[in-house]
Amino acid sequence: MWPLLKHGQMVDGVKPDELQEQDIVIAEHPYRKKLIIKQISCITDDQIELRSMDPLAEDSRTFGPVPHRSIRAKIINV
């Protein structure tokens, strides 16, 4: 599957009040100082698993689940 977004494409996001599986979010990468856009695949009390829509891209299968505080925004418009 191809990436949903192209490099440099603008998106609209809001601070999330509530997150659900399948939401697309902006999150802090757990090991690099950069922001990433991924889809939520699983939510637990203390962690969120993120998946890329591109099977070759890095996601929680590579870097593991992220804490809830890593989520910066929920994408509302592409």
Image (tube, grey):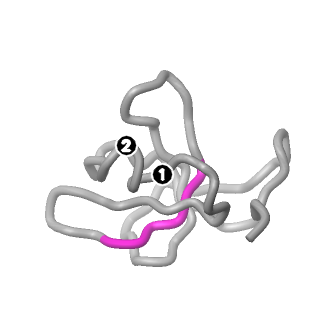
Callout 2: 10 Å neighbours few (<14), some, many (20+)?
few
- Describe the element under mark 2 as helix, strand or loop: helix
- Magenta range is 37-42
Residues tagged 1 and 2 counted as in contact (Cβ below 8 A): yes
Depth check, front residue: 16 or 28:
28
Callout 1: 10 Å neighbours few (<14), some, many (20+)?
many
Q: Quadrant of residue 69?
A: top left
To which residue does mark 2 refer?
63
Query: In the figure, 58 relative to 45: above or below?
Result: above
User: Mark number for residue 59?
Assistant: 1
Q: Quadrant of the C terminus?
A: bottom right
Residue pushed farthest front?
A: 56
Question: Residue 57, position in %: x, y?
Answer: 61, 50
* Residue at image coords 38%, 65%: 17
Looking at numbered disc 1 in the image, what kind of residue is underneath it? Asp
Question: Residue 55, position in %: x, y?
Answer: 61, 62
